[in-house]
Amino acid sequence: MEDSERQADQGSVEVQLERPLIFVLTAGILVLALISGINVLYSFLYAMLGLIALSYFWTTRNIRNLSVERHLLSKWATLGDEVIESFRVSNSGALPVLWVEVNDHSDVPGYEAGIVTGLGPREHREWKSRAVCSRRGLYRLGPLRVYTGDPFGIFRATKVLPDQATFLVYPPITEVPGLALPTGRQSGESRSLRRALHLTTDAASVREYVPGDALHIIHWPTTARRGRLQTKEFDMEPGGSTWVVLDLDREVQAGEEDESTEEYSVKLAAALVYRLIREQKSIGLITYGEENRILRANKGSQHMWRIMEILAVVRAQGRADLGEVLSEVTPQIRGSMSLLVISPNTDPALVPILVNVSRRGIRPTVLHLVPQTFGSDRNSGPLQQALGAAGLSYIEIERGQEFRTIALEKGDEDTRRRAQTVETTATGRIHDVSAG
């Protein structure tokens, strides 16, 4: 959400007649007064017309004098966090508002932010609304509808405040106890203690300036502190990257809601990404669901959150078979890498494809979500036997797997901007894979 504080004092206003019988009664009094000529009936007629005019004036003035402010305390949340908003409804007019109802039409599950209250002249009310984020995804905050009326209930006015914003709920940041991940087969996976002679992404230390050093690699803060030119030294780049492939084929999923292979896959991917980024590894993500997405391999906290943004919204609505996806993307991935495949697929036909991946110098590991434990009748035994016979690594993930939640400080992350680096295919085919 770009702006966490929004004032919605403008909007379309609609006034509805709640008691149409009052016009029927007024018309009846008019007819009787004209027929009989009784002065008392004329007095009643004038009183009714005055009441209608007063009620309409009261209602329209009050609805235009009402404004609502909302302030989102945090721009993002992970699963299990609270979304908290503070609201303020104000009456800027000289007339009291006997009742005002504020309805929020946000689509965050379990989130209700409305209130019914009264306001005196130039008075305001404040309240907070909160809900636990029970489902990952991209949600809408707003719009607001404000209702009020006159003391006699003749008219009801509605102001629609169309201001909306998005609120992203990330998958939980967790770690999986006891999960041992293999690394790439070839050298280059660990960080070298030697210094690079060319620029890399990792500045390791500083040294005295040597004639011939480029000016753009001078570390100016250290230079200012020490009073003499200091030059950055760079670590050697790790030679390999890790790719995570998330199987979102709808035909192979099992379970329901939080206890489904879809949600376990997302949580497992998030845990792997957090772990590898923390270990300064370069990591990329491939998903294919309603939209196929590829995020190139990179390192760092900002890259991790780009991946988390994808994991927050992916759904297991894909129609492509995992084997087809692997056959398509692996020729485009350079060697000296690891490939982590998260899938509940039980088809042994995947094994020859993974063997071919291995021959390309990429070490595949299947993190297999055992579908029987999620209520499916599909047997994973043949796949596991074939993987073992081929000498391929696989790890079983069953329903009830422990995920230990890691608490994060949001202060620093609230300053980040949502990255727009995700490449999406319109035809449903994956393209443009690149590794950093």
Image (tube, helix red, strand yellow):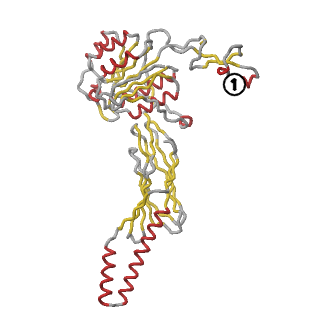
Q: Position of residue 249 (x, y in %)?
A: 30, 27
Q: Tell me the residue that label 1 is attached to.
A: 220
Residue 182 visible in the displayed image: no
Q: Against 89, is 209 above or below?
A: above
| Residue under the image location 65 percent in, 20 percent down | 217
| Residue under the image location 30 percent in, 20 percent down | 324
| Residue under the image location 37 percent in, 88 percent down | 40
Q: Nearer the viewer, residue 202 or 74?
A: 202
Q: Secondary structure at mark 1?
A: helix
Amino acid type shown at disc 1: Trp
Q: Position of residue 112 (x, y in %)?
A: 41, 50
User: In the rendered image, which quarter is residue 166 located in?
Assistant: top left
User: In the rendered image, which quarter is residue 13 located in?
Assistant: bottom left
Horizontal side of residue 20 vs 406, given as left or right: left
Q: Position of residue 145 (x, y in %)?
A: 42, 56
| Residue under the image location 67 percent in, 22 percent down | 219
Q: Residues within 10 Å of mark 1 (few under 14, many from 20)?
A: some
Q: Nearer the viewer, residue 83 or 431?
A: 431
